[in-house]
Image (tube, grey):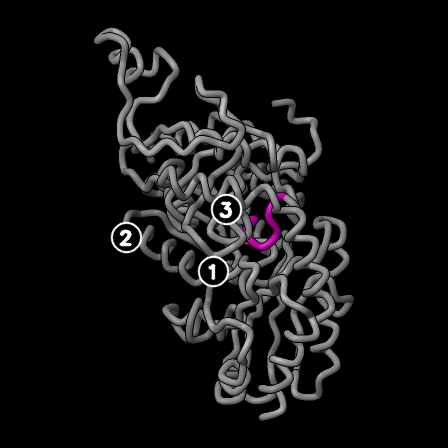
Amino acid sequence: MDKTFDLDTLAVRAGILRSQFNEHAEGLYLTSSFVFESAAQAAARFSGEEDGFVYGRFSNPTISMLQERLAALEGGEACVATSSGMAAILAAAMALMKAGDHIVASQGIFGATQQLFGILERFGVATTFVAPNDAAAFKAAVRPQTRLVFVETPSNPLTEVFDIAALAAVAHEAGALLAVDNCFCSPALQRPLDLGADLVIHSATKYLDGQGRVLGGAVIGRKALTDEVLKFLRTAGPSLSPFNAWVILKGVETLRLRMDAQSAAALEIARWLERQPQVARVYYPGLPSHPQHALAMRQQKTGGAIVSFEVKGGRAEAWKVVDATRLISITANLGDTKSTLTHPATTTHGRITPEARIAAGIQESLLRMAVGLESVADLQADLARGLALI
């Protein structure tokens, strides 16, 4: 499909592959294998001499449709879909790194990503975690062995915004790749490849699905890079199921509509939280008080739908707000049409060391809210119930 179409058109139309039945909706192909016309064709398909579907672990028409659509939305040459967002990060690292290589990553990345990079240490891939948030600090952390610079922007959960173009320059000067986790924004709000990134990573579980139904992940970038990721996936098998791919395809159709509405609601809630006497600090890129507000407004279309905030006090006070909710879901997932609330220090970042949490700025008083599509007034009333207990 012509990738010059607007994002809304690509989100609905890109990647459609119709069968001989000429169905209008995307087909769901639930099959583990594919039949060949001859032994020669089977050999050609397995060797890669002939294009076509071979085996469900690494090729399927429904998954191919999703991959083409996500590549079009992000402006990438190709995409490899995976079973989850963490599987996408693992696949990219295993495909593009080797023992002796080095990663430079932001200190404020998702807890599971920090743990994954710790596991890679066992296999000879070292990681340096960088603070503060500036390109000079990343440049200072680069070694001759550096092959990957990795950031989330905005980050989870403090919504730090990183200058993608500046970090791309740092990475490329060192002969390294820049990978950007675009989970919080999605291509509806930000396209890292346009700003110089080499790879975009997604947890499709979040905003791409958008309704908390299935797990999925994706790695998007130049075909030369995604081909290496596909080689790993073909052998190791962290594969997306066709059903999950089909669900995510349906979710992507409403991506921009949801992101616009949820971002607008998040901005209202962030402004309201700043006025509450029980709130010590609000983290939201759409607020002028955010340290990287100007960068966010250049790099993103909106501030996004994640609002993090610190209450006055500690864990006990934060838990009071969580436990008082009657509408907002107490869960660590995000990107859903239903608003969610979590205490990062004991959930998403609970398995990293206390020292690592403190270094990342994650206090016991911090809460992260993923704003959904409910009435803003109802969400504010739900939060106010708990804040009144502090």
* Mark 2 crowdedness (10 Å alpha carbons): few <14, some 14-19, many ≥20: few
- Between discs 3 and 2, the one toward the N terminus: 2
Quarter of the image that includes the N terminus = top right
Front position among marks 3 and 2: 3
Which image quadrant is residue 246 in? top left
Residue at the limit of the structure toward the bottom, as seen here: 389
Residue 9 seen in the current view: yes
With respect to residue 69, does 20 lie above or below?
above
Q: Main secondary structure of the magenta part?
A: loop
Residue at the limit of the structure toward the left, as seen here: 39
Residues under labels 1 and 2: Cα distance?
Answer: 20 Å
Front position among marks 3 and 1: 3
The reply to whether dot 1 and dot 2 touch (C-beta < 8 Å) is no
Which residue corresponds to the image point at 28% horizontal and 52% vertical from the top-left? 122
Q: Amino acid at mark 1?
A: Phe
Which image quadrant is residue 278 in? bottom right
- Residue holding disc 3: 202
Which residue corresponds to the image point at 61% horizontal and 33% vertical from the top-left? 75
Q: Is residue 186 magenta?
A: yes
- Residue holding disc 2: 122
Assign a secondary structure to mark 2.
loop
Q: Is residue 327 magenta?
A: no
- Between discs 3 and 1, the one toward the N terminus: 1
Front position among marks 1 and 2: 1
Assign a secondary structure to mark 1.
loop
Residues under labels 3 and 2: Cα distance?
Answer: 25 Å
> Viewed as shown, does residue 91 lie left or right of 6?
left
Image label count: 3
Which residues are the magenta region? Answer: 182-187
> Viewed as shown, does residue 306 lie left or right of 271?
left
Assign a secondary structure to mark 3.
strand
Q: Position of residue 354 (x, y in %)?
A: 41, 75
